[in-house]
Structure formats: structure tokens, C-alpha cells
């Protein structure tokens, strides 16, 4: 979805390096999420944020940190990258301001990260 | 936390109707059932959501029996472009803390052949 952008789209880095993945959205949504996807394992939630001052750990937050710089921006950092963090990373957003029946999440195109 | 079970893969041919069933025996009262579609190297895309009985939109239908312990995603007259992974999710989509209850499993890889 073009309303959710991720940079970079591909990144190769070395073990021990710090790396930041960025996500921006123009949908005006308050909620943002970071997932990682490994072959055969589906998507797993790393962190999520319901607004700028609300950040929560997901299933697999160890080794990751996040920053919600603004409502539209949510960054994921790997403080010291390791090879088993090689994966496809997705950012997503959703609208939590309306008590609607569904909480559809809109995903970005993904960042393919390789840690050597 | 309701765990879901889906077939790992399914094969079909163009023009056929495809039904993908998901089991969720421990579904909670407030949980909804949501299906997402994912093409290779893209993020998942919402398809449909329901609570009980039948829901239909322009893309698919979702059938949920009275006990809600399973659900079936129905794709009418599939085409090659429907080849994708389909995820069944169960969770409370509305209230606080809902996000950490939306767990993507491994999904079902649907392969549509000519």
C-alpha cells in the first residue's frame, strides 16, 4: 500500500552493526506495528504503538527497539545486528480512533534485511 | 489466546471455487475471525472479517458455523492472480490490547494453475 512506506527496501549489514528501519504513513492512523517474517513461520509481532506516547512489546522484542517520532513515523532499530535477525520486516498501521467492528491493518512493502 | 490451524497448502485450477478452512477451537466470545492475503514479497492485505454466520464482500465469502470453532474462506472462480498465502487470524479487533492477540500463523499457500 503506497500510503505506508518503508526505507530501506533492502539492506545488507554485518554482525554487530546498528541498523535502523524506518516507516512512514500518510493514512493518518494512530496505531503502528513492526513485524518480522521468516520462511515457514508467518509474521511475528515485534513492537506496536497505539500513539506517540504508547509503545508496547510484541511476541519477539528482544534485540530490537523502536521510536515513535511522530504519529506518522515509527522506526525499528537493531542495536547490534546478529545473523538470526535476517528476515523480511513489515510495518503496518491501523485506525484505532473509531470503535469500528474491525481493525484492518495496512502493511508497507517490507524491508529485506540480511545480517552477515 | 486462540490458536488457529490451517492446511499448509492447497492446489486449484482457474475458474474453480476454493474453500480454505481454519480451525480455532479456543475462540473467545469477543474474538472475530479475520483473513489476510499475502503475495510474494508484499505485505499482507485484509480480505474479510466476520463474527458468525456468513459474511460476503466483493472478494470472498466467510462462513462461520454456530459454534465458531472453525471458519471457511471461500474464493469464487479463482484466477492465477489469486495464488498467494492466506492467513486466518482470531482476536478481539476493537479493544485495547487487541493487537497482541492478532497472531499470524503460517497460513495456507494456495497455488492456482491454468
Image: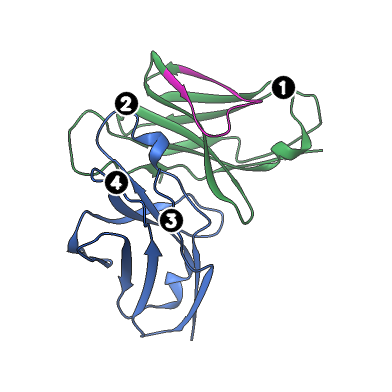
**Discs 2/3, front:** 3
Tag 1 and tag 3, C-beta contact below 8 Å: no
Find residue A100 and report its image quarter: top left
Residue drawn 35% across the image and 49% down it:
B90
Query: Which of pointers 1 and 4 indicates the residue nearer the eye?
Result: 4
Residue at mark 2: chain: A
| Residue range of the region highlighted in magenta in the rendering | A55-68
Q: Earlier in the sequence, mark 3 or mark 4?
A: 3
What residue is pinned by disc 3? B4
Chain coloured blue here:
B
Q: Please give the name of the residue rendered at 36% of the width and 42% of the height, measured from the top-left corner.
A: A105
Q: Which residue is mark 2?
A: A30
Q: Chain of mark 1?
A: A
> Farthest residue toward the top?
A53
**Which residue position is annotated with label 1?**
A18
Q: CA distance from mark 4 to mark 2?
A: 26 Å
**What is the distance, in whole Å, between disc 1 and disc 3 at their CAs?**
35 Å
> Mark 2 to mark 3: distance in Å?
28 Å
Q: Which residue is mark 4?
A: B28
Q: Chain of mark 4?
A: B
**Is disc 3 placed on a helix, strand or loop?**
loop
Please name which of the two marks, 1 or 3, marks the residue nearer to the observer: 3
Q: Earlier in the sequence, mark 2 or mark 1?
A: 1
Labels 2 and 1 touching (C-beta < 8 A): no
Amino acid at each position: 500500500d503506497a500510503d505506508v512506506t518503508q526505507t530501506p527496501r533492502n539492506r545488507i549489514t554485518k554482525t554487530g552493526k546498528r541498523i535502523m528501519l524506518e516507516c512512514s504513513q500518510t493514512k493518518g492512523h494512530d496505531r503502528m506495528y513492526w513485524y518480522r517474517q521468516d520462511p515457514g513461520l508467518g509474521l511475528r509481532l515485534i513492537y506496536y504503538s497505539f500513539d506517540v506516547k504508547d509503545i508496547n512489546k510484541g511476541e519477539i522484542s528482544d534485540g530490537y527497539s523502536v521510536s515513535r517520532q511522530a504519529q506518522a513515523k515509527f522506526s525499528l532499530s537493531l542495536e547490534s545486528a546478529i545473523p538470526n535477525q535476517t528476515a523480511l520486516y513489515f510495518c503496518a498501521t491501523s485506525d484505532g480512533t473509531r470503535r469500528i467492528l474491525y481493525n484492518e491493518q495496512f502493511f508497507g512493502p517490507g524491508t529485506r534485511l540480511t545480517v552477515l | 489466546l486462540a490458536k488457529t490451524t490451517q492446511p499448509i497448502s492447497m492446489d486449484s485450477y482457474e475458474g474453480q471455487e476454493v474453500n480454505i478452512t481454519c480451525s480455532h477451537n479456543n475462540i473467545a466470545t469477543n474474538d472475530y475471525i479475520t483473513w489476510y492475503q499475502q503475495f510474494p514479497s508484499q505485505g499482507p492485505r485484509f480480505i474479510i472479517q466476520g463474527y458468525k454466520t456468513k459474511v460476503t464482500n466483493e472478494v470472498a465469502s466467510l462462513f462461520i458455523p454456530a459454534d465458531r470453532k472453525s471458519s471457511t474462506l471461500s474464493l469464487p472462480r479463482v484466477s492465477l492472480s489469486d495464488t498467494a498465502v492466506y492467513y486466518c487470524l482470531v482476536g478481539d479487533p476493537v479493544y485495547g490490547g487487541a493487537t497482541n492477540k492478532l497472531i499470524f500463523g503460517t497460513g495456507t499457500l494456495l497455488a492456482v494453475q491454468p
